[in-house]
Amino acid sequence: MSDTHDSVNWSFEKQCLRVVEALQKNGFTANYYQDSQGAARHILKEAETATTIGMGGSHSVGDLNLKERFREMGKELLVPKGPGNTPEQAMEIRRKQLTSDLFLCGTNAVTLSGCLVNIDNTGNRVGAMMFGPRKVIVVAGRNKIVAGSIEDAIRRVKDKASPPNARRLEFDTPCASTGFCADCSSPQRICRIISIMERKPARTDVQVLVVNQDMGY
């Protein structure tokens, strides 16, 4: 491992630890992990007491490759875009996620002050993050850290996360073609709901796993 790599990891580690401290001050349960394997082990342990587990389209969570492990544990997975699901079935699964024992998701941005900032199209993810599931675990890679304000975090989402997400979903939006946010009025606009969690919701157990590794968009 090069000196440059070590120095970059050290710098990101300091940022991650600062975010964890800020999240804890804001009432969240927050943990730091050096890599995604540590986060995966944490989630598997928390999943032991869950019967139903909701998972959205988060790449941060998807890259942990936990679905098969959950099936081996006998868990009921609530995944809207499962093989063969019709749009109606997918919507019903999204509703069921709101009352799951464990809901797993990523976050589009997390500020150094410990705020989670997300932008949704449908709203099922941000809805479940706030209320409904017995436990929520949010995975935040180091690339999601924003040193500035809430406005900077929103800008980060629109500039860095939304264009590749729109392209992945094959939405007909300007950003899916150009790679740049146009604050469009497209019928398939992906940025419709902005969620800012300044403190842990009063009635929801929310854990945030901050990982010293780039994860998701």
Image (cartoon, rainbow, N blue to C red):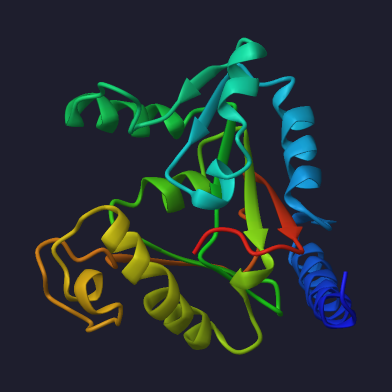
Q: Nearer the viewer, residue 65 or 97?
A: 65
Residue 30 x, y percent position in the rendering: 78, 56
Residue 101 x, y percent position in the rendering: 59, 26
Q: Residue at x 24, y 75 (%)?
A: 175
Q: Is any part of residue 92 visible from this angle?
A: yes
Residue 29 x, y percent position in the rendering: 78, 52
Q: Residue at x 13, y 63 (%)?
A: 172
Q: How many marks?
A: 0
Residue 55 x, y percent position in the rendering: 49, 36
**Quadrant location of the N terminus in the rendered image:** bottom right
Kindly indicate the quadrant of the structure image that contains residue 23: bottom right
Q: Is residue 40 above or below residue 188?
A: above
Residue 139 is left or right of residue 92, and the answer is right
Residue 76 is left or right of residue 170, and the answer is right
| Residue that extends furthest to the front in the rendered view of this protein | 2
Q: Is residue 109 above or below residue 182?
A: above
Q: Residue at x 37, y 77 (%)?
A: 158
Residue 25 is left or right of residue 188, and the answer is right
Q: Nearer the viewer, residue 5 or 133?
A: 5
Q: Nearer the viewer, residue 63 or 20?
A: 63
Q: Is any part of residue 130 visible from this angle?
A: no
Kindly indicate the quadrant of the structure image that contains residue 103: top right
Q: Residue at x 21, y 55 (%)?
A: 170
